[in-house]
Image: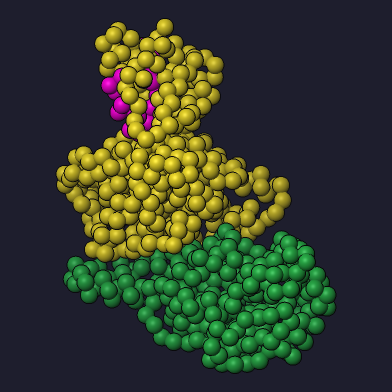
Chain colours: A yellow, B green
Amino acid sequence: MKKTKADPKGVLTGAHYLDGDHALAEGALAAGCRFFAGYPITPSTETAERFAERIPMVGGVFIQMEDELASIAALIGAAWGGKKVMTVTSGPGFSLMMENIGLACMLETPLVIANVQRGGPSTGLPTLTGQQDMMQVKWGSHGDYAIIALSPDSPQECFDLCVEAFNLSEIYRVPTFVMTDECVGHMHEKVVIPPAEEIELVERKWYTGPKDKYLPFKPDTDMIPFMVKVGDGYRFHITGLTHDERGYPVINAECQNVCVPHLVDKINLNADKIIKIEEDETDNAEVIVISYGITSRVTTRAVRKARKAGIKVGTIRLITVWPFPEKRIKELAKKIKAFVVPEINYGQMVYEVERSAFGQAPVIHVPHCGGWVHDPEDIFKAIKEASK
Amino acid sequence: MKEKDRPEEKNPIEDLLRMDRIPHIWCPGCGIGVVVTSFAEALRKSEIDLEKTAILSGIGCTGRVAGYVKLDSIHTTHGRAVPVATGLKIANPELKVVVFSGDGDIAGIGGNHFIHAARRNMDLVIICVNNFNYAMTGGQVAATTPITANASTAPFGNFEYPFNLPYLAEASGATYVARWTALHLRRVTKSMQEALNRRGFSFIEVITPCVTLYARRNRLGDGLNLLKYYYEKSEIQHGADTKTLDISYQGKLIVGKFVDKDKPTFLDCMNEHLGKVLGDKYKPYGGNHD
């Protein structure tokens, strides 16, 4: 992995008062993103608007495509043209992107997609918050594949995790998602953008060997194949069909059972390196609240109240949502009375917690179908229930 | 006997094909192969840098072309080759980017992308092999199937109005529009060569025989019979008004070059406009050479 520093051209060093959407755009520019294709959709549009306003002075392109199908398609083309690329969307647009998210996974293409989630299904609540695409990001395209998804809980983290998402997408040659929501997206807070030399980036894993020996899908020792750019003279082929290391289609079970496990394993076997969670007082906890994004901030208040009431409660905030930190949760499940999982949906990540707890600890879900964040009182009640 | 002893055994376009992928999947009598041969010849005659040329396809019989032509090539999803090509061209403007796909891919499922890329005058060459049906999946009705022609999902004949593709392309903003049949190979080659040597959104429709499905289902005979139909019913009318180019079942086929005009491309417009509005603040965009 070759590390570089951010190009100062794209870095707006200083302390700013930004909302999460704008911070995402600044994160992308700092990470070296120079191609953004998007389609307007509430509540994510401000990211595209900011990128469109900033990029002419940085050197790069913003293009508003005809729909989200085209946006992600253009990202794939531009990534293979050598650019770092990003798009932003929300639920309905995310659904439209599913087809080519599969293609991006199959072609092992580094790209970043931010989803500023709103209430669904369908058109749902365009202007109001939700965390209802957390399973879709993992399973939404057909077939087996793996992705990386991060969940920021503040505008500052929208910046930080957007940079991180670019780095992960380059390291693992995989679409990487920043799964934020309307609340964080439209919340204004202080965002500190460091000087360019303090922003560490990962360079794409470029192939430099002989031209006729290039194999676009041959895993290197770290499982990740090398990339080249279209136009560098390799005359290579890539396809969404099941393919061998050359990128040639091979339509049989043998090839499928090499091609597909690779896509999943390169993420799952590196999960320990990828996963970041934030733990607080989990060591002697009786109850652990697991949350992510805006819900973790609402949880803070409920936890404070519970601790005052004498309940030993710890918290886990998922910064990485996918791959899921199953090992750590399995470990903790043996030691505690119960997990509490509040999330702005009717049951998504809670199933991952249940799966990881493996029957060792009960899991209490605190659902909310979107439109607003939880009442901290509801989370508090669940903690109290869990401590009994 | 070795190949060097019998040079006539060597395919003249071998250097432009991935020979390790041959034989191809196309049926005997299919027209796609000869369109590929024309393309290979056009690539040579155009003298463009093949290392800076990319070919993209969508899904379908013609969608397999990108897999056989030995250029940087991407086999994308159904209908999405045009927006992938748009991203690729913008990322690396020094590339010549060709989309080679079928009527179902370009005008059916990818129709919206097609008209928007034409509207932007994206600097792309679009080669659309029109065989009047969805062949890969077994001969279903398409957006190009002539009225009354039979298809597996129009078992009593098609009653939907088909697209007139050159008219659609021109109306959407294409700056080069031509139509030929698989019989007019010399002219197909010439159009492709012109398209490869110009800038802007170029669209070439090539009507080709689908023997296994379209011809069989409609009892039109074999590939030769379809070429006879092209021979008897095609009429070269360069510069014809694209409104007049509808195709009826076994009816007249007006072919030729209909549109060829200069107009700034997407990137020309972007650089010029932003340069004018933003002045020195604007960083002119030149792709990977920044």
In this rendering, position of residue A52 left or right of residue B141: left
Q: To which quarter of the image does residue B144 belong?
A: bottom right
Vertical order, B261 against A68 (above or below):
below
Count of numbered badges drawn on the protein: 0
- Front one among A200 and A20: A20
- Front one among A127 and A204: A127
Magenta stretch: residue A141 in it?
no
| Residue B201: image location, x then y, percent | 47, 77
| Residue B140: image location, x then y, percent | 71, 64
Residue at 75 percent across and 67 percent down: it is: B151
Residue at 66 percent across and 92 percent down: it is: B235
In the rendered image, is residue A245 in sight? Answer: yes
- Front one among A92 and B61: A92
Quadrant where the C terminus of chain A sits is top left
| Residue A213: image location, x then y, percent | 56, 61
Residue at 41 percent across and 39 percent down: it is: A119
| Residue B236: image location, x then y, percent | 63, 92
Residue at 43 percent across and 26 percent down: it is: A367
In this rendering, position of residue A106 left or right of residue A278: right
In the rendered image, is residue A213 in sight? Answer: no
Specify the farthest residue to the left: A15
Magenta stretch: residue A296 in it?
yes
Vertical order, A264 against B248 (above or below):
above
In this rendering, position of residue B42 left or right of residue A384: right
In this rendering, position of residue A91 left or right of residue A358: left
Q: Which residues are magenta?
A: A282-302
Q: To which quarter of the image does residue A29 belong?
A: bottom left
